[in-house]
Image: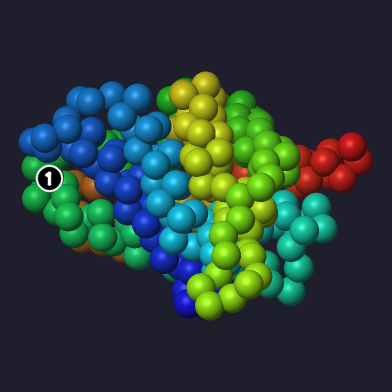
Amino acid sequence: MTPFVAELLGTMLLILMGGGVVANVCLKKTKGNGAGWMAITTAWALGVFIGVVVAGPYSGAHLNPAVSIGLAIGGTFPWCKVGIYILAQMLGAALGALLVWLVYKDHFDATDSPDDILGVFCTSPAINHPIVNFLTELIGTFALMFVVFYITGGELALKDSNSTLPIGLGSVGAIPVAFTVWVIGLSLGGPTGYAINPARDLAPRFMHFLLPIKGKGSSHWNYAWIPVLGPIIGAALAAMLFYIL
């Protein structure tokens, strides 16, 4: 398992579970239809958990371009690896979105709300206010990244080796990361759906654009910059504050 493959598979699992729970809750005629926000935030957190468990021993399980950039700014990850990590994360997120569509295809066909269909793939604001929406994504990712720098001690020994490699977002364990994402979703996710991850939003949004989904409507590209730039700037600010402190 190379770091590239680990990031791809870890991000794929994250989106498969995260997009999957939104499909289960929001699409018509599913067993979980109407289960609500607690189900969505919990499954996203657990999706982070399993993604980190799989990818952690091989790549550190960033699973998020904003995290890779933030760790590089903070001096704990080499800049020369940022591009290949982001590529793997984007491909993994696109593959995860494709798998969600395959699993729930009949339910996409049964759903007549373009907003519910779009929500399976990417985020959109509850109230459209670009400045506030941008700040929401920035603050949510700032919280994620700042906490990540202070979570330590998650290490696994590699098979057939005496060395250890950090699990998770820069020397963190899977469970603390999952709880951090969970509380961000519960506390700050209401205004925008808390992308806090450019790969989580941009690659699945592109899949929404490409896939032949009946009645899917617009992919809302005019909003797409917010869940990309907001998380990147939030992660950068968290890294700079951590460096100063």
Q: Amino acid at mark 1?
A: His
Horizontal placement of 189 versus 111: left or right?
A: right
User: Can residue 93 be seen at all in this image of the molecule?
Assistant: no
Horizontal placement of 70 versus 6: left or right?
A: right
Q: What residue lies at 25% left-to-right and 54% top-to-bottom? A: 100
Q: Nearer the viewer, residue 237 or 226?
A: 237
Q: What residue lies at 12% left-to-right and 37% top-to-bottom? A: 30
In the image, residue 83 above or below residue 185: below
Horizontal placement of 120 versus 196: left or right?
A: left
Q: What residue lies at 35% left-to-right and 25% top-to-bottom? A: 38
**Image position, residue 156 (x, y; %):** 56, 60
Q: Quadrant of residue 180?
A: top right
**Image position, residue 179 (x, y; %):** 51, 34
In the image, residue 142 above or below residue 68: above
Q: What colouring method underlies this structural image? A: rainbow
Q: Quadrant of the C terminus?
A: top right
**Image position, residue 111 (x, y; %):** 14, 39
In the image, residue 22 above or below residue 153: above
**Image position, residue 234 (x, y; %):** 70, 41
Q: What residue lies at 66% left-to-right and 47% top-to-bottom? A: 153
Determine which residue is flagged by label 1. 107
Q: Nearer the viewer, residue 137 or 145?
A: 145
